[in-house]
Image (spheres, rainbow, N blue to C red):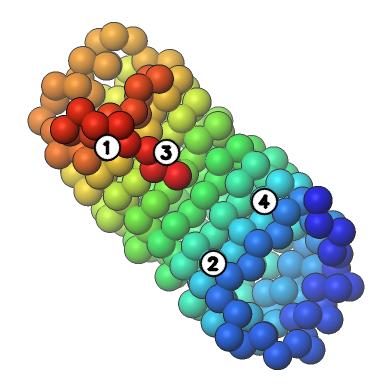
């Protein structure tokens, strides 16, 4: 656990000469939405490319709103909000209306988001550069995948994680029928509540033939039968 709080982050953001800093990782901090505001308004982070705010803290949805509205974080490419249960679909809706248009990786695993968050992601130009999207262990269902399937912007996703999301057979059907699925190279669908029928679709349908790696059970394999893992 990191004991850093709002006052400390304000000092760092507004007074420190950290222009060469490209990567920051914060684990279970005491930072609130006010601290995120200081962070987002700090010119010191103008070259930041990767931000990880894991576990509790970081201001929840209003913290994400402050982050999304920053005019200084324009170079941010990777945003990791792993296991931050204070973030809901509302926070992702803020992100979808924000200025972080250079994001290539977005990790929301373990957050409290649902289908309305996937809809916000799917229909916002902000996310058209995304290559990796991790929505595992969230409340996403087949309804969220329906939004992804008809997205005009999520056409470049190469790695998609939906482990432990209850997408069911219908979710697999949406993936099968979507043009957006063709860009996916690595697909993770462990414990997603689908039946053997959907598994056969995943194994045999042309849409999934070009996957370089997949995981939709306890076995990880690539198209050559070799063990493969993507983190």
Q: Residue furthest top?
A: 196
Q: In the drawing, what numbered circle is on residue 161?
A: 3
CA distance separating discs 4 and 1: 26 Å
Where residue 179 appears, x then y in whole percent? 19, 43
Element class at badge 4: strand
- Residue found at x 68% / y 67%: 66
Identify the mark nearer the N-term, 3 or 4: 4
**Residue at label 4?**
54
4 or 1: mark nearer the eye:
1
- Residue found at x 65% / y 62%: 25
Element class at badge 2: strand
Query: In this image, 90 relative to 78: left or right?
Result: right
Identify the mark nearer the N-term, 4 or 1: 4
- The vertical placement of 209 against 46, above or below, is above
Between residue 18 and residue 5, name the one nearer to us.
18
1 or 3: mark nearer the eye:
1
* Quadrant in the picture for residue 196: top left
Query: In this image, 132 relative to 10: left or right?
Result: left
- Residue found at x 55% / y 46%: 108
Between residue 147 and residue 56, name the one nearer to us.
56
Q: Tell me the crowding category of disc 1: few under 14, some 14 to 19, or many 20 or more residues within 10 angstroms, Cα based.
A: many
- The vertical placement of 138 against 217, above or below, is below
Query: Number of callouts in the render?
Result: 4
**Residue at label 1?**
213
**Residue at label 2?**
50
2 or 1: mark nearer the eye:
1
């Amino acid at each position: 656990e990191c004991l850093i709080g709002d006052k400390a982050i304000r000092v760092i953001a507004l007074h420190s000469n950290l222009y060469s800093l490209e990567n920051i990782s914060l684990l279970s901090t005491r930072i609130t939405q006010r601290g995120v505001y200081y962070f987002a308004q700090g010119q010191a982070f103008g070259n930041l490319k990767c931000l990880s705010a894991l576990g509790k803290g970081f201001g929840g949805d209003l913290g994400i709103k402050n982050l999304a509205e920053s005019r200084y974080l324009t170079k941010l490419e990777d945003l990791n909000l792993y296991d931050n249960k204070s973030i809901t679909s509302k926070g992702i809706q803020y992100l979808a209306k924000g200025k972080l248009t250079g994001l290539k990786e977005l990790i929301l695993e373990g957050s409290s988001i649902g289908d309305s968050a996937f809809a916000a992601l799917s229909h916002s130009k902000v996310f058209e550069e995304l290559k990796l999207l991790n929505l595992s262990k969230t409340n996403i269902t087949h309804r969220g995948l329906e939004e992804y399937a008809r997205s005009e912007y999520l056409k470049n996703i190469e790695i998609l994680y939906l482990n432990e999301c209850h997408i069911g057979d219908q979710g697999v059907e949406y993936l099968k029928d979507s043009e957006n699925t063709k860009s996916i190279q690595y697909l993770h669908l462990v414990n997603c509540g689908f039946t053997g029928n959907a598994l056969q679709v995943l194994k045999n349908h042309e849409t999934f033939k070009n996957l370089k790696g997949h995981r939709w059970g306890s076995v990880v394999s690539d198209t050559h039968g070799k063990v493969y893992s993507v983190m």
